[in-house]
Image: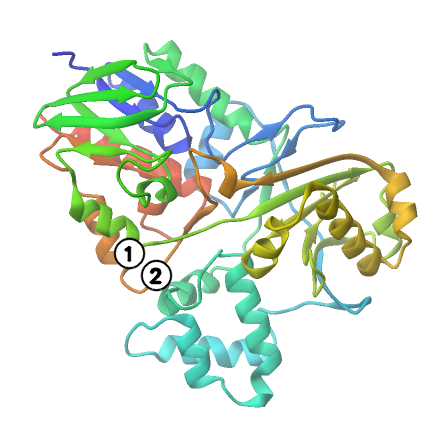
Amino acid sequence: MDKSLLVIGAGAAGLMAAYELSGAGLPVTIVEAADRPGGRILTLQDNGFSFPVEAGAEFVHGSLPITLGLLKLADIAHRPVKGKMVRVRKGEWGREDLFSDDGWSELMAKMGELPGDMPLGDFLDTYFAEDRYALLCNAVRGFAEGYDLADLSRASTLALYQEWQEEGQGEFRVEGGYSRLIHYLEQQCLSRGCKIHYRAPVQEVRWQKGAVELRCADGQTFFGSKLITTVSLGVLQLAAGASGGLRFAPDIPAYREAALAMGYGSVIKVLMEFKSSFWEKKGKDTGFILSDEAVPTWWTQHPDGSRLLTAWIAATAMRNFRALDEQTRLKTCMDSLATIFGVNVDFLKGELAAYHVHDWMDEPYVRGGYSYETVGSGTARALLRQPLEDTLFFAGEALYEGPALATVEAALDSGRDVADKINARP
């Protein structure tokens, strides 16, 4: 039997685990379904854009030690994200300051006083049902659904309280795109003797204590002594044998139930490069724009002066957008921008230089965006973090425990953590 350590997935968690294990001199084989590394990190280098653009993960959310440490090792620069956040209602611009107004302070105080956890939707209905809280509740619901990709009927109030206490930390972008970090890890793994197989979607995991066999859709098989599964939570939540899903033999029903108990949301990103930065007429220091349009959330690349606008579409807006054909999607984006910036749609058509829509629900080996905390996530995550028969291990951003939830840092940390568990074994 091959004693290789098998890793399913060449995303941030899988590559980080392989990087650490191969650095300790262990043989590692990575099996990746897609034709590229990175998973939910995807920097587009062409598609008509004049510079690299991020279809997936884009921000380093604060001074995150693993991410920034790897960037330093790879000699990859990062730059701060700047610019004010504005709220646009019916074309009228105003400053958005969700995290410092009186209503927000009262909300946070009440969240901190909760004796036990409850879904955020129930929390708002219980403690902030009065009409005077209507605007606050709308903003909170929009933020939780849009930023955290959360289902309010399941999302943990206490987890969101902990996360929102950390808001306001500096954010960064990776010069040249996040994929540079992924390719650095990939090359480091290869230089340490790792084997990486792309276009090899695993359909079935046959296992017993100390022995694993991976069976792929194209007939390839891989053998090893241990397996680290780093597929997204969206893939783990698929029924056994479903298209894009994983079948375990023997099955692992408790682990499947744990995955289903956790939250996983999705998002669509729209990238639009224009011939000029026409939005600067409204404010040169504009960073993020929140609106009530069909495509509600946009951001610029401030302060680098590029001509890119990015739309972030989640929750109800995403479901509506997904139902549209390609032509109507573009029209909806143009109409939203026209109202937000007070310009003519024909002007926008003449200015548009490149356009790309990336729907992460449509990615067959991802099936969504990132995880969020539900009531009960902690118990489910604790189970998934426990190896099964010292043979099956799981890693990924959804299994991270710490303040940087649902980030690249979370995936890297989880990959390192599972590698440490294996390295510590005799």
Provide residue 16's location: percent of width, then percent of height.
36, 28
**Residue drawn at (28%, 75%), measured in percent from left and top?**
116
Q: Is residue 344 above or below residue 32?
A: below
Q: Left or right: 250 with respect to 62?
A: left
The quarter of the image holding the N terminus is top left
Image quadrant in which you'd find residue 394: top left
The quarter of the image holding the C terminus is top left
Q: Which mark is residue 341?
A: none
Provide residue 72's location: percent of width, then percent of height.
50, 28
**Callout 1 secondary element:** helix
**Residue drawn at (66%, 49%), measured in percent from left and top?**
324
Q: Left or right: 32 with respect to 288?
A: left
**Callout 2 secondary element:** loop
Q: Which mark is residue 374?
A: 2
Q: Is residue 103 above or below residue 186?
A: below
Depth check: give the residue in front, 78 or 107: 107
Under mark 1, the amino acid is Ala
> Mark 2: few, some, or many residues within 10 Å (few <14, many ≥20)?
many
- Circles 1 and 2, Cβ within 8 Å, touching? The answer is yes
> Is residue 421 at least partly visible in the picture?
no
The CA distance from mark 1 to mark 2 is 7 Å
